[in-house]
Image (cartoon, rainbow, N blue to C red):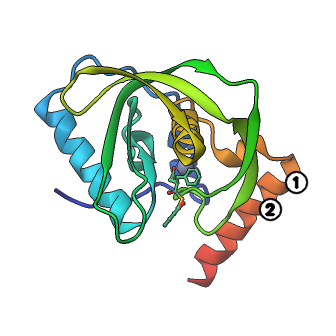
Amino acid sequence: MSIRRILTVDNAADLAVLKQKSATVETVTDDLRRLMDDMLETMYDAPGIGLAAVQVGEPIRVIVMDLARDGEEPAPRYFVNPEILTSSEETHAYEEGCLSVPDYYDDVERPSKVTLRYMNYQGETVVEEAEELYAVCIQHEMDHLEGVLFIDHLSRLRRDRAILKVKKARRAA
Ligand code: K1U
Ligand code: ZN
């Protein structure tokens, strides 16, 4: 397993990749499982609670996630070709972050509950409901598969301010 570099919005070449729409995966192979293992290790190292393959430069429809809290057993989840089947009318605002927009957090409003279908690590099809942080995180990660960042849900002013903040932090580092 290896830790991959996470693409960030302050780098023009990285941003061009992050804005790409990710391609559908044909089958869950050992190569794909190796990528998912690397993604999980990269996410734990960051640290974060979710990661889309495009964030490590692989624009394919794959996501990893672990919502276990400090002190709980790790609970890795793997999503291949996830689709949202239903979304609740009810919405909820949550202060989101993104490893591709380091150290910037802002409120995004999304449906509170979604039903999703995906293939897991074994390539089995799963249909399940997501709510609370799981619903927030899967919608955030699925936006990545469409080339959408959480800051794209903000006003132009707040989005530009976020990118400027990341660029300034990078220059100061
Ligand atoms: O970049 C990403 O897509 C990962 C992102 C996921 C996410 C967080 C919050 C709301 C929606 C989606 C992150 O993991 S940002 C870092 C973070 O939230 C976190 C880091 C350490 C401990 C706990 C949370
Ligand atoms: Zn993100």
Q: Is 160 in front, or is 95?
A: 95
Q: Is 82 in front, or is 35?
A: 82
Kindly indicate the quadrant of the structure image that contains residue 52.
top left
Residue identifier under label 1: 157
At label 2, counting other C-alpha atoms closer than 10 Å, the crowd grade (few under 14, some 14-19, many 20 or more) is: some
Up-down: is 20 above or below 85?
below
Q: Where is residue 91 in the image (x, y as percent from the top left)?
A: 75, 35
- Three-letter amino acid code of the residue under disc 2: Arg
Q: Residue at x 30, y 49 (%)?
A: 76
Kindly indicate the quadrant of the structure image that contains residue 117.
top left
Residue identifier under label 2: 161
Left or right of 113? Residue 165 is right
Position of the C terminus by quadrant: bottom right
Q: Position of residue 59 (x, y in %)?
A: 41, 34
Q: Which residue is drawn at 22% across and 19% down?
A: 27
Instruction: Classify mark 1: helix, strand or loop.
Output: helix
Q: Which residue is drawn at 11% across and 33% down?
A: 30
At label 1, counting other C-alpha atoms closer than 10 Å, the crowd grade (few under 14, some 14-19, many 20 or more) is: few
Left or right of 148? Residue 75 is left
Q: Position of residue 38 (x, y in %)?
A: 24, 52
